[in-house]
Image (cartoon, rainbow, N blue to C red):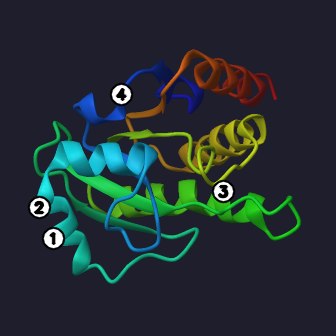
Amino acid sequence: MACAARMQVVQGDITGLALDAIVNAANSSLLGGGGVDGAIHRAAGPELALFCRNLGGCKTGDAKISPAFRLPSRHVIHTVGPVWQGGEAGEDALLASCYRRALEVAAVNDVRTLAFPAISTGIYRFPADRAARIATATVASVLASDESFERVVFCCFDAESRRRHVDALQEVVNG
């Protein structure tokens, strides 16, 4: 199946999705924080933070997996996005690495369906349009060479983020 047919944009709460995994836009401690990270930790319950304590943190651009505990998904893949510093500190490559590494971790853990939030676009201040283009292009590139993923969802918190991701996905599809 074509990679574009396996990508979808939705607006909603990522913690309510019943997929193999949801991706957490985590901080480097993996112990919870604000935004989507806080929402995932609250919904998963205290077991998530307890489990994550043993993961030893996570570097920017990398990803680690945990059980989802009280969430409807099976796993949480935690990735640490870059803090925006003006675009000259390798932020684009680090953000692309978040999506690529999350998919690599997913593949080795038999995850076939997963959802991403808009990584780094909240308190890390990554420009949202730029982040959406990097997200969709990176995921499309991985899916083009990996048929194991059935569905990758970009789960957007609000209508503006949804529009950005829909437009970015159209750019990927139309080349």
Indicate the secondary structure of the residue bearing disc 4: loop
Q: Residue at x 65, y 48 (%)?
A: 138
Circle number at residue 61: none
Return the disc, 1 or 4, that comes first in the chain's sequence.
4
Three-letter amino acid code at the position of disc 1: Leu
Which numbered dot is residue 13?
Answer: 4
Residue 82 image offset from top left, x and y in percent: 65, 63
Nearer-the-camera pick, 55 or 167: 55
Determine whether label 2 and label 4 are within 8 Å by CB: no
Which of pointers 2 and 4 lies earlier in the amino acid sequence?
4
Amino acid found under the numbered disc labelled 4: Asp
For marks 3 and 4, the one nearer the N-term is 4
Residue identifier under label 3: 96
Residue 50 numbered mark, or none: 1
Residue 111 visible in the shown view: no
Mark 1 touches mark 2? (CB < 8 Å): yes
| Labels 3 and 1 touching (C-beta < 8 A) | no
CA separation in Å, label 2 and label 3: 29 Å
The disc at residue 47 is: 2
Q: Is residue 129 left or right of residue 113?
A: right
